[in-house]
Image: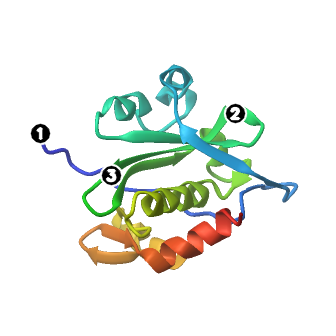
Amino acid sequence: MKQNPQYIDIEIDKLTNSIENVITKDSFQTDVSLIDKSELKSITKKNGWLFNWSNEYKQPDRDVYKLTITGNPDIIQGLVSITEREDHVYMHLIESAPFNLGRNKVYLGVPGNLIAFICRISFHRGFDGYVSFTSKTQLIEHYKKTLGAINVGGHLMVINTDAALKLIDKYFKN
């Protein structure tokens, strides 16, 4: 059963060195880890999330990661879903927590942080940082500018080794 790709539709608000409080400008170190099934109970459309993450979690070929602030593991700042492909990592979905969206968002840098993490996974798995995803048309230029992604045809975007290293360097200094 071939599924249609999800189009990535998230604005990279700011590339920070962690995540940054919008009001105080304080930076907070983050952790990215696999989400636990029990945590999905609160990640629902009713609670403001845009995607069905329980459904995403059930896909056998996918890993769903959560971004949290170090020392505060119970509050999920954002989520991302990936699959390992033959020679790269494919990003299916990415979403900032409802309180990190729009004009009144609490933290900047959530999507960039998650994407940098995926680039790091790509290196760890021997794919030289390569990550691909399917972009919405109106965001192709945005991803070229903010992530250094390359449009390789249609809606398909690729983050190559150089772009991945820049993102990783921004978020994971040590």
Q: Which residue is found at the position 44% from the left and 76% from the top?
A: 161
Which amino acid is tagged 1? Met
Instruction: Give the answer, above or below, for where 5 lies relative to 71.
Output: below
**Quadrant showing the C terminus:** bottom right
Q: Nearer the viewer, mark 2 or mark 3?
A: 3
Residue denoted by label 3: 84
Instruction: Give the answer, above or below, for where 106 lies relative to 56.
Output: below
Q: Nearer the viewer, mark 1 or mark 3?
A: 3
Q: Which mark is residue 1?
A: 1
Cα distance between the residues tagged 2 and 1: 36 Å
Which amino acid is tagged 2? Pro
Q: Which of disc 1 and disc 2 is earlier in sequence?
A: 1
Q: Is residue 105 visible?
A: no
Q: Which residue is found at the position 55% from the left and 54% from the top?
A: 114
- Secondary element under disc 2, as helix, strand or loop, is strand
Near-viewer residue (41 or 137): 41
For the image, the number of numbered tags is 3
Which amino acid is tagged 3? Glu
Q: Position of residue 18 (x, y in %)?
A: 71, 58
